[in-house]
């Protein structure tokens, strides 16, 4: 079980749809095709808050850590994340900034996640891997 409320949300890229009533935390790799597919599913859900924690799996995706840091360092992280994950548009190169990428990747590993996407829900449950709509919405609603 994961203590959802103890997650360091200030180290996540937050995206809110509608009133954001439903909540989910996602440990994601910017080069993970399954994470990108999940993002397309999230685009169809109203009233959700998504907390994206960067978890680049560099052994599978050697450039993922660089991309995660570039996205984090953008002025509008959420817009940069969505543009990359849903449209394949990488934001402009920016100088480095202080980022939590190593810390959030380590957190995902400590929580037992060894693949992406990994989802954590407010009721403490978690799931590795994505689900298509409408099943994804049912899972999110059941695990609030």
Image (tube, helix red, strand yellow):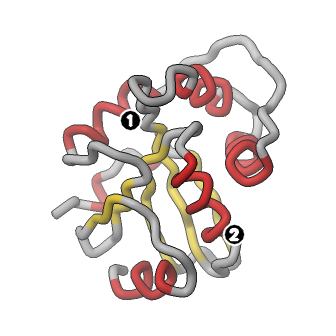
Q: Residue at x 43, y 53 (%)?
A: 117
127 and 81: which is toward the camera: 127
The Cα–Cα distance between marks 2 and 1, rounded to whole angstroms, is 23 Å
Q: Residue at x 58, y 30 (%)?
A: 68
- Disc nearer the start of the sequence (2/1): 2
| Residue 94 versus residue 119 in the image, above or below | above
Would you identify the image quadrant in which residue 20 lies?
bottom right
Q: Is residue 21 visible to us here?
A: yes
Q: Residue at x 43, y 37 (%)?
A: 55
> The residue tagged with tag 2: helix, strand or loop?
loop
Q: Is residue 65 left or right of residue 111?
A: right
| Residue 80 versus residue 139 in the image, above or below | above
Residue 104 tag number: 1
Mark 2 is surrounded, within 10 Å at the Cα level, by few (under 14), some (14 to 19) or many (20 or more) other residues, namely few
Residue 94 tag number: none
Which image quadrant: the N terminus? Answer: bottom left
109 and 75: which is toward the camera: 109
Q: Residue at x 25, y 38 (%)?
A: 109
């Amino acid at each position: 079980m994961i203590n959802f409320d103890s997650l360091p949300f200030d180290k996540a890229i937050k995206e809110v749809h509608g009133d954001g009533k439903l909540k989910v935390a996602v440990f994601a790799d910017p080069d993970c095709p399954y994470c990108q597919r999940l993002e397309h599913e999230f685009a169809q859900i109203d009233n959700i808050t998504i907390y994206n924690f960067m978890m680049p799996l560099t052994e599978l995706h050697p450039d993922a850590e660089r991309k995660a840091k570039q996205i984090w360092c953008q002025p509008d992280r959420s817009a940069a994340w969505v543009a990359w994950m849903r449209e394949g548009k990488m934001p402009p190169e920016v100088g480095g900034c202080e980022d939590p990428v190593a810390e959030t990747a380590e957190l995902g590993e400590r929580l037992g996640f060894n693949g992406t996407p990994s989802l954590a829900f407010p009721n403490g449950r978690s799931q590795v891997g994505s689900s298509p709509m409408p099943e994804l919405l049912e899972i999110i609603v059941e695990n609030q």
